[in-house]
Amino acid sequence: MSLYLKYRPHDFDNLEGQDFIKTTLKQAIKDNKTVWAYLFCWPRWTWKTSTARIFAKTINCENSKEWNPCLTCWICTDFLDDRLIDIIEIDAASHTWVDNIRDIIEKAQFSPTRTKYKVYIVDEVHMLSKWAFNALLKILEEPPKHVKFILATTEVDKVPETILSRCQRYDFKQGTPENIKNRLTYIAKHENIHIDQQSLDYIIRNSRWWFRNAISLFEQLIVDSKIDFETIVKTLWLTNTDLIENFLNKLISKDKSIVDDFENILESWKNIKLFFKDLIFFARDLMIKKLKQWENINNLIDIVDKLSDTYSKTKNSLDENTVFLVWIVKIVSSYIQPQNNTIHTEEKIETKQVFYTTPEVKVEKITQTQETSFKATQNNTPNDDLLSDASDIFGWWEEEIESFPKTTSENTTSTSFNKDTLVAELKKIWAKAATTMSLRWADFLINWNSLTIKFKTNFALKTINNNESITLIQEGLKNIWREDLKIELR
Ligand SMILES: [Zn+2]
């Protein structure tokens, strides 16, 4: 028997993942509020059928403990040995059931022979014939007290609305890395298998968080009652983590020697796609880790995003090595571009500072430039460098002034300012991604020496409303304007 089948959960406590479903079903049994029809939906391999069996056993078990089946009474054992005729499992996808399924469902009218409830577990219920659905519907419309139906499906869209409306629905989920880890550790302990941390991480990553994949891979990798990463690397031609980490660092730091590394990998590895698959998973995990620690992840997002695209492109390409090489060159050279932009932005900022040297001349100068800017746009003669620069700098103004209401006070001259400039500056001084993202959800208003930031969502306001973020924004503003601005958050 495969480990996947052997370690199917037999009681609620052993049902890893699906915590919500587990708690709700147990509570219903405890409060004696179970319904006559349940629908367990969605992915394969999420232990839908196992959950249905656990439920069927628990409601019939003679001495259930803590709303779990005891697994030792005659009902539990007869069921495990497949001798309990009152819990009926039907695989609607199997042809053997097609002819007599209607009869079986119609027999639900009769009381159970030995148990309290007659339970029908219908797997892949969407495959039932029209006649069988009709028979099922008839029972569900006037359900006998002794009957429970548990319908399971991977394609809920194909189940008729009339059936859906009579069921209590539960949507099953894929496991989390933590769920997979717990299950594998449990199996390793019971099977006496030694497994190291790197191997465990490798299996979790490659299972795509499906229990079945994880347990099958676990089983395949056992050699002499242990799973160790060295052996996995040798037998599967895997890449070791150091190599991947080094490669990723070079991508991030746009180190052009990465092209040599790529050629070395081509020479030494059989399967370049496997290398890049590991690289994607590694970068993705690192991205999630950094995000949780509020670190800057912009480069990583770009790498994971583009690499996933590139990986799918290799399917239809003549030469996957070239596809990957082109991607590497693109990534390494794409980082040069933003640098140039930054220099450009700094030039703009310097020009801008001229208008903000002393408060007294501010209004006049700004108004002048604004007019010049409009003029330049209207006449469409941006030949003069200065004019076109000014038009560039204040281009945002024309839009933003309209979208943001001016303050009515006579004594203040107000305007909004370029958000992107501040965000770019904050990125330079390593503000958290959450700070810069939240600023994108805000409008800005400058009144002389104060800046009002008006947030469009409460969440964005909460994210910024702390000393650390405010100090950083002040620092960023000072870098741009060389003077202190008072900040007001709204
Ligand atoms: Zn029992």
Image (cartoon, helix red, strand yellow):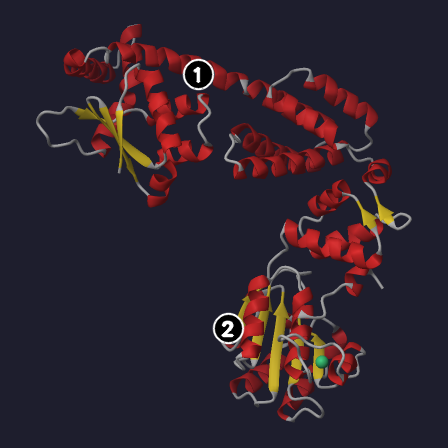
Judging by the rendered image, the residue that carries numbered circle 1 is 342
For this orientation, the residue located farthest to the right is 224
List x then y, in percent, for residue 420. 37, 25
How would you rate the neighbour count of disc 2 (Cα within 10 Å): few for under 14, some for 14-19, many for 20 or more?
few
Which circle's residue, 2 or 1, is located before the other in the chain?
Answer: 2
Judging by the rendered image, the residue that carries numbered circle 2 is 161
Placement of the N terminus among the 4 image quadrants: bottom right
Q: Is residue 449 above or below residue 194?
A: above
**Which structural element holds mark 2?**
helix
Q: Residue at x 62, y 52 (%)?
A: 176
Q: Quadrant of residue 459?
A: top left
* Quadrant location, ligand no. 1: bottom right
Q: Is mark 1 within 8 Å of ligand 1?
A: no
Q: Is residue 104 left or right of residue 455?
A: right
Total number of numbered labels?
Answer: 2
Amino acid identity at mark 2: Glu
How would you rate the neighbour count of disc 1 (Cα within 10 Å): few for under 14, some for 14-19, many for 20 or more?
some
Amino acid identity at mark 1: Thr
Placement of the C terminus among the 4 image quadrants: top left
